[in-house]
Image: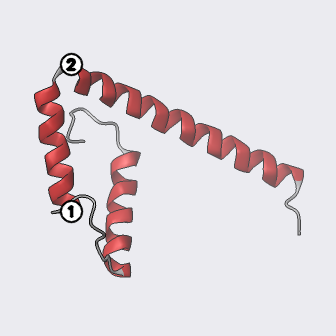
Amino acid sequence: MMPSNTNTAQLIEDFAQKVTKYGNLFEAQATELRKNPEKAKEAYDRILKWTGIDNPGQPKVVTAAEKERKMKYMEELCSMNPTSIDE
């Protein structure tokens, strides 16, 4: 069944808002990271530790509960207005 034009328009609008929000967030953070490569490396290392990736390039088995917990955390992170590189 095809979505109605109203539903399609709303889906497109929601998607466009998310692309804009996350694009702006990425640009703001990337600008800060380019200013201080050492800070960028520290942030990268913290993310590797947080994700549990001890050996990049090797697959890691993630349980459904762990994935759900991390997705919820990422959603919370993305909904806030960051004030530092760690946010």
Q: Secondary structure at mark 2?
A: helix
Q: Residue at x 28, y 60 (%)?
A: 57
Seen in the picture, residue 81 relative to 32 is either above or below; the reply is below
Q: Amino acid at mark 1?
A: Ile
| 37 horizontally vs 60: left or right | left
The Cα atoms of the two marked residues, 1 and 2, are separated by 26 Å
Residue under circle 2? 35
Q: Residue at x 19, y 59 (%)?
A: 50
Using a 10 Å C-alpha cutoff, classify the residue at mark 1 as few (fewer than 14 neighbours), some (14 to 19) or many (20 or more): some
Q: Residue 10: horizontal and vertical position, in percent? A: 74, 47
Vertical arrangement, residue 82 with respect to residue 52, above or below: above
**Viewer-side residue, 49 vs 18:** 49
Q: How is the image coloured?
A: secondary structure
Rendered view: 71 above or below 68: above
Give the labeled residue for mark 1. Answer: 53
**Which numbered circle lies on residue 32?**
none
Residue reaching furthest to the front: 57
**Element under disc 1:** loop
Give percent across and percent down for residue 55. 18, 62
Quarter of the N terminus within the rendering: bottom right
Query: Which of marks 2 and 1 precedes in the sequence?
Result: 2
